[in-house]
Amino acid sequence: MTALDIRLCSASDLEGLGKVLDSIDLFPAEMLPELMSPFLGGDPADLWLTCLSEETLAALCFARAERLTQGTWNMLALGVDAGFQGRGIGAALVAALEEQLRARGARIVIVDTSSTGPYEMARAFYARNGYREEARIRDFWAEGDHKITFRKALG
């Protein structure tokens, strides 16, 4: 595997991360500046990481502290550019996120996904990385599309 550089996101990453988002179906790149704004403004309840591979922005990960909890964080976005998938970047980024969160006193990370077929690989990814299904809310996203919440203790 090529050497990876995982670091906190900066405002100068917006264009490159937009290209990552354009290559995958995570959320529209146009939403990125607004979503990253609290983090870029210093909000300690948000954490954005990026990964460079071959000196190119290849991935992003975003987590937010859950309000009214003690040390619970929600991983809200994880995306690897289509051209860089299958190289272990996602796993490395999640491990880096967990390390950052432990340093912030986090106890638990949760992540939500869908029960539908297109998300089978995502569910398998989380399981391979130590996340276990904690909850399932039937018909959450749509009729027949259940919300599956995975959980990992960081202690």
Image (cartoon, rainbow, N blue to C red):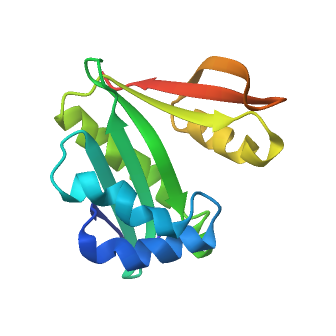
In the rendered structure, the answer to whether residue 125 lies left or right of residue 35 reads right
> At x 17% / y 56%, what residue is drawn?
41
Examine the image and state in which quarter residue 144 appears.
top right
Frontmost residue, 129 versus 110: 110
| 155 lies above or below 51 | above
Q: Position of residue 94 (x, y in %)?
A: 42, 46
Q: Is residue 124 left or right of residue 74?
A: right
In the rendered image of this protein, does residue 155 appear above or below residue 121? above
Residue extending farthest bottom: 55
Q: Is residue 12 visible?
A: yes
Residue beneath the point at 41% across and 53% down: 61
Q: Is residue 118 left or right of residue 84?
A: right
Foreground residue, 25 or 34?
Answer: 34
Residue at 24% from the left image edge and 68% from the top image edge = 10
Expressed as whole percent of the image width and height from the top left, the position of residue 59 reads 46, 64
Residue 68, percent from left and from top: 29, 18
**Residue 120 appears in which quarter of the rendering?**
top right
Q: Can residue 88 be seen by looking at this rendering?
A: no
Q: Quadrant of residue 60?
A: bottom left
